[in-house]
Amino acid sequence: MPNSPEITRRDFLKSSAKTGAASLAALSGVTLITQPERVFGANDRVRVAICGVRGRGFDHIREYARLPKAEIAALCDVDENVLDRRLGDVEKLGKPRPKRYIDCRKVMDDKSIDAVSIATPDHWHALIGIYACQAGKDVYIEKPCSHAWWDGYQLVRAAEKYNRVVQMGAQSRSNSAVQEAVQKMRDGLIGEVYLARGLCYKWRPTIGHTPVSPVPHGVHYDLWLGPAPEHAFTRNRFHYNWHWFWDYGSGDLGNQGIHEVDIARWGLGVDWPSKISAIGGHFMFDDDQQTPNVLNCAYEFDTPDGSRKMMEFEVRGWITNHEAGIGTGAFRSHGVPAAGLAAHHPHAHAHKAGAGLGPVSGAPGTIGNIFYGSKGYLAVEGYDSYMSWLGESQEPGPRANGTGNHFANFIDAVISRRKQDLTAPIEEGHKSTMLVTLANVSYRLGRTLRFDGKTQKVIGDDEANRMLHGTFRAPFTVPDNV
């Protein structure tokens, strides 16, 4: 495994100084485009290319279409059937028809594109982000920001080296209520916060079995596989259900759970864990799914003052109870009505498609976080609400529903060139994504991992480090030198 020293701003600046703006980096046919930093005028709009437009990518289309400072300049998807439908959808929104791309690498050659917004399957996330940084484009990248440690590590390095604005799609970080909840914990509302509990209880029915079948007309399957190992086409490994296969996804821990993992780490105020352990399995269903539908994760963090903090995380994929009122409508009693919950979730399209909101009745799952402190506890529901309970008698404390626009935060930072204004910069996204990756490695190996955040390596476990590193199929490899 290559050396992986701790990522520091000083290291990045040194690397950038040595390389210089004139140094070109080749990556799978993508060449760094050297051009002056674009200065946006008062009437200029950020020209965005969206890569991956079927599910979450359709949300990207709708969100950018609402922003006066953004222009949807291009769409890219390896499924031409989806791509052509979305080009028409853009026109239905009253916007000009965007350019059409099948290969994301061709997007990078288009000098008119300012930013790339990525909503592909997970195994492509970081690589497209690296391509974009090398091509002088800013990046909005869906969660999780990487599929392994190595591609995430190199994405962070590329963002710094090429001075790119890179945001991970952790929408809660732009929400006013969740920001308020974290600040109140920082100010001591519930005392010393020693434990965060993340909840991802979401109905997921069986995916059944699907045989090997011909690649559908209009689908460029080798491009879809990209860095993933070669495998014959099956319906279950394609649209949406790719989440449940290790070659492309990371289970519900990395699909839905990454939002709550990120909130938990943010609320605790911690960076890298020192110990990780995860157990679970795939229960009830006999089907093609590889990832667990029940997973219990435990993380231990060492803090600078010598104390420790804990994080628990649970994934459950079927019938379960609620906790702290999350999912019952209690958080909406003075704000957004419970009946409108799905419309306010960033992944509402997936819920409507039967991808896990709840049973036929429409009852929501239990998606959120609970923080425990010496003076009380605080719960965050979904991405935009919190409640608190204080003292031994658990008297109701501060609560709020909030709003925020994560895409607007990204576009504003692209225009201002103030990376410090990003609410979910890639450095934070990488740390939270690593919690997902480490837990999955612990689960798959069946043992506890001890982690050194300074080197970003598992201590004394070469097998874990090899798995953490990941493998990438040529020519879609992650370069040693971005």
Image: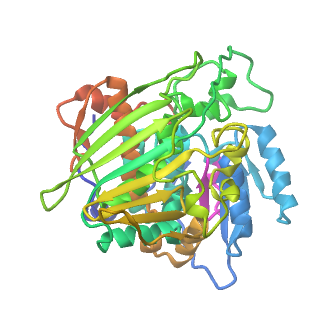
Residue furthest to the left in view is 306
Residue 27 makes an appearance in the image = no
Residue at 22% across / 46% down in the picture? 455
- Is 460 above or below relative to 373? above
Q: Nearer the viewer, residue 398 or 169?
A: 398
Span shown in magenta:
106-119
- Pick whichever, 79 or 31, lies toward us: 79
Q: Which residue is depicted at the point 13% across and 62% down?
A: 305
Picture coordinates of residue 51 (x, y %)?
65, 49
Is 156 displayed left or right of 145 in the figure? left
Quadrant placement of the N terminus: top left
Q: Is residue 113 magenta?
A: yes
Q: Nearer the viewer, residue 473 or 388?
A: 388
Q: Position of residue 359 (x, y in %)?
A: 67, 37
Residue 75 vertical placement versus 362 (above, below):
below
Measuring from the top left, give residue 247's x and y in whole percent: 51, 28
Between residues 308 and 242, which one lies in front from this camera angle?
Answer: 308
Q: Is residue 348 above or below residue 121?
A: below
Q: Is residue 412 visible?
A: yes
In the picture, measured across the screen, residue 89 lies left or right of residue 284, that is right
**Above/below status of 376 relative to 250:** below
Position of residue 449 measured from the top left corner of the image (x, y, whole percent)? 24, 34
Give the image quarter of residue 411: bottom right
